[in-house]
Image (spheres, rainbow, N blue to C red):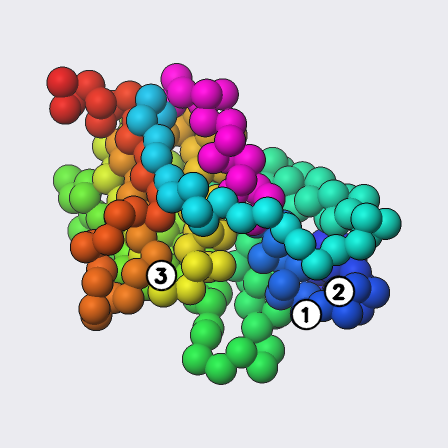
Amino acid sequence: MSNLLKNTNAFADHCGLPARHIFDDLFTLLYSHICAGKKEYQHLYPAVSFDARKVQPLDGYRDADRDELMRLLVMLIAELDNAVPFEDVVTDKYGTLLQGDSGQFMTPTPLSNAVSEFLGSAREGGNKRAEPSCGTGALVMGDLRHTYAVGGKDAVSHVDYSINDLDQRLVRIATVQVMYHSIRHEAPLKRLVVHNADLIRNYDTSPPFFAATSWRGVLEII
């Protein structure tokens, strides 16, 4: 078990909160940072939009505990920073926190990587992609990792991805995973559109949860 998970579990016991709740809140902070700091990566994504109602403040923490929450956030950021482009260092950790959550299962990272490599040749020339039940983004990250490994930044810059999940916590994590790596490695997708909708009832009919269009997408629209 990683130090991040050990410390998250220990902090959760201290706060009397589920460990998954703590992990979700770390991504709430990262998501808020991405939304608030869009001017910092405007050279990559000139057009960014999001539902401001979904940028949520954190509550339920005592003032004395916020320093520890920030320490966990620094540990998470370090793991993201040390990963290779689009390497999923989140899903396997999150999966260990789902014990007792019926009906949810995160695709293991080795499986998502294997599926992406197996489907890689079929993806060539097919740059409009979708993952309607993305979870924490395991398959999306595996796909982008393989795309980057084979074709570099240029290949990623042609990808137009639409992702969705019914669970707002998961779709937020998937958004952060894709955007954090994209910004960190300066490898923007052509477009990323994120939905938090019921796949059967209203998928792709409500305003996006988050959307980012890169310089390539903007140029081609012009």
Where on the picture, by quarter, is residue 204?
bottom left
Q: Nearer the viewer, residue 4 or 112?
A: 4
In 3D space, how far apart are the residues under numbered discs 3 and 2 (Cα atoms)? 26 Å
- Asked if residue 186 lies left or right of residue 155, the reply is right
Residue type of the residue flagged with mark 1:
Pro
Q: Which residue is mark 3?
A: 165
**Badge 3: residue crowd in 10 Å (few <14, some 14–19, many ≥20):** many
Instruction: Name the element at disc 2.
Output: helix
Of marks 2 and 1, which one's residue comes earlier in the chain? Answer: 2
Q: Which residue sits at x=67%, y=39%?
A: 78
Measured from the top left, where is residue 107 in percent x and y? 44, 66
In the rendered structure, which disc, 3 or 1, sits on the residue that comes first in sequence?
1
> Residues in magenta?
28-44
Residue carrying label 1: 18
Quadrant in the picture for the C terminus: top left
Residue 186 - label: none
Is 82 on the left-hand or right-hand side of 136? right
Give whichever of discs 3 and 2 has the lower sequence position. 2
**Which residue is disc 2 drawn over?**
12
User: On screen, 51 above or below 202?
Assistant: above
Amino acid type shown at disc 3: Asp
Spatial CA distance of label 3 from label 1 is: 22 Å
Query: Circle 3 — which element?
Result: loop
| Relative depth, front residue between 31 and 95 | 31
Q: Tag 1, which secondary structure?
A: loop
